[in-house]
Image: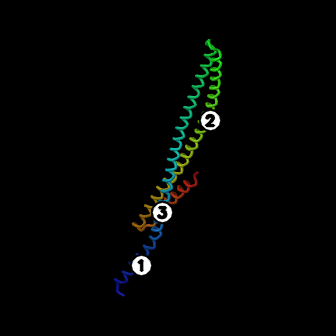
Amino acid sequence: MEANEVQELQEHAEHGEHDRMLRPAALTMTILAVLVAVVTVLGHRTHTEAILNQTRAAVEQNLVSDEWAFYQAHKIRSNDTDLTTDLMGVVTIANKDDAKKKTKGYADHQQHWTTEIKESEDRAHEKEKKVNEYEEKVEAAEARADRFDLGEVLLEIGLVITSITLLTHKRMYWFVGMGFSVVGIVAAVMGVLLK
């Protein structure tokens, strides 16, 4: 065997050693890329959930406002009916039968307004509870989304640092990248577990 053939075999063996060292880093990068994609999708879906719940809360809030407006309108009508009844008791009316009919009609209206006021108030309070439920859902979704975003960023950092291993052939970068990735995975798992 000639000297240059021996040198070529030695270089080939060294190159094979580098390839064996870089295989775990390449596999890690592949796994991290998949994890980044999964965590990104989870984050996007959670942000969408938060936005949908914010929209639902806004719609319910509009319904609450409408219901309180109905309540106020019924209260005003009730007050007007009450004032008219009081006025009829003070003013002298020529036709006493007609006055009695009107007073009875006002009393019926007053009873109707009292019922309407109570129902309107109850509906407004129910809708306010729904608004609060949606707002709680928004807060929970935003907290989960924050965890997913943090997990995504850390996994991406881990992926980039791990890829430096392929360029430098130094395993130190692989270990540092794995450290960031583990913290990113923990953050994403916390997002999944947070309800």
* Disc 3: which residue: 34
Q: Nearer the viewer, residue 63 or 167?
A: 63
Q: Amino acid at mark 2?
A: Asp
Residue plotted at (56% across, 32% down): 70
Please, what is the three-letter code of the amino acid marked with disc 3?
Val
Residue sitting at the far bottom: 1
| Residue kind at label 1, given as amino acid type | Ala
The percent coordinates of residue 151 (x first, y second) are 50, 55
Q: How is the image coloured?
A: rainbow
Rounded to the nearest whole Å, what is the CA distance between mark 2 and mark 1?
82 Å
Q: Secondary structure at mark 3?
A: helix
Q: Which mark is residue 151?
A: none
Foreground residue among 130 and 70: 70
Residue located beneath label 1 in the image? 13
Q: CA distance from mark 3 to mark 2?
A: 51 Å
Q: Residue at x 62, y 26 (%)?
A: 109
Query: Mark 1 or 3 closer to N-term?
Result: 1
Question: Is 144 located above or below residue 22 in the figure?
Answer: above
Residue at 58%, 28% in the rendered image: 74
- Per the image, label 2 sits on a secondary structure element best described as helix
**Left or right: 110 in relation to 162:** right
Residue designated by label 2: 122
